[in-house]
Image (cartoon, rainbow, N blue to C red):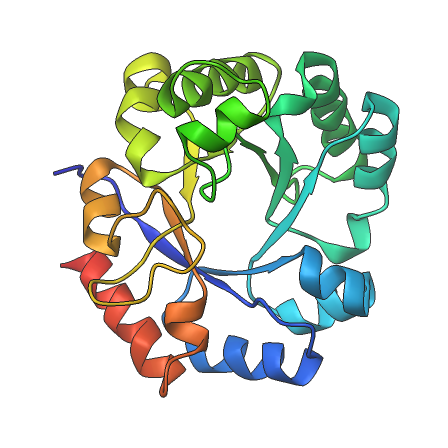
Amino acid sequence: MSGRSTRLIVALDTKDTAQAMRWRAESAGHAGAVKLGLEFTYARGLEAVRDVAGDSPLFLDLKLHDIPNTVASAIGSLKAVRPAMLTIHAAGGRAMIAAARQAIDGTFPDGARPLLLAVTVLTSMDTQAMHEIGVEGSVEAQVVRLGQLAMESGADGLVCSSHEIAPLRAALGEAPVLVVPGIRPAGSAVGDQKRIMTPAQARAAGADWIVVGRPITRAADPAAAAAAIAAELSD
């Protein structure tokens, strides 16, 4: 089993500000960070993102993917939101990732710079889905290829499936911060995820952070669900 500490990010996947605030409050004692993404940001805007996050470290999951100058400019607009982590797509390429790195370093003061995390292959995709968009080979090979590119270009870490933690560690060592969505406690619904593990399995594999949404936020008692996952990570 990995000796590293694995922490919980609670995904606040809603368009409703009041609901997101309730979920944050209910999970606050058990989560190391909260995630807000495209759904909430598009519906409510960056000011609401900042308000909902409050004092909790914010994983701002916007998956930026555009020409380098546009991505850099977008990052420059996020200073007031104070994210702790920010996502881009590794598939945007070396120049885009490097531009994102430069924008973070130029926008945020020392001590407040968010981790730049590159998304490798979405956890909703499998080999067939990759082949349908023209990417040959295995999911694992593509994740490692994009992970190497991202880290060489200035990323601090990667967003990957739990099934790719081991090959990424083998290829890149301990340096990348690995954030792992697609986590489902034993017995919970899989939903639209294809490559999943339980919290304990992801911890054993060596994840730094796991992202859990519906198994907590749709639970009858979100606080208890978050507490159970946090306990599983610390066993």
Side of 99 where 221 appears, left or right: left
- In the rendered image, residue 120, in percent from the top left (x then y), is placed at 51, 29
Note whether 197 is above or below 125 in the view shown: below
Q: Identify the residue shown where x is 74% and y is 14%.
A: 95
Q: Which residue is drawn at 55% across and 12% down?
A: 152
Q: Which residue is drawn at 53% across and 75% down?
A: 24
Decide if residue 4 is on the left or right side of residue 37: left
Q: Measuring 22% from the left and 37% from the top, which residue is drawn there?
A: 205
Query: Residue 41, can we see it?
Result: yes
How many labels sit on residues? Answer: 0
In the rendered image, which quarter contains the N terminus?
A: top left
Q: Quadrant of residue 22?
A: bottom right
The answer to which of 60 and 54 lies nearer the viewer is 60
Residue in front for this viewpoint, 63 or 130: 130
Place of residue 221 in the rendered image (x, y in percent of width and height, measured from the top left):
36, 86
Does the rendering let one see residue 29? no
Residue 235 in percent (x, y) is at 13, 59
x and y percent of residue 173 in the render? 32, 18
Q: Is residue 184 placed above or below 133 in the rendered structure? A: below
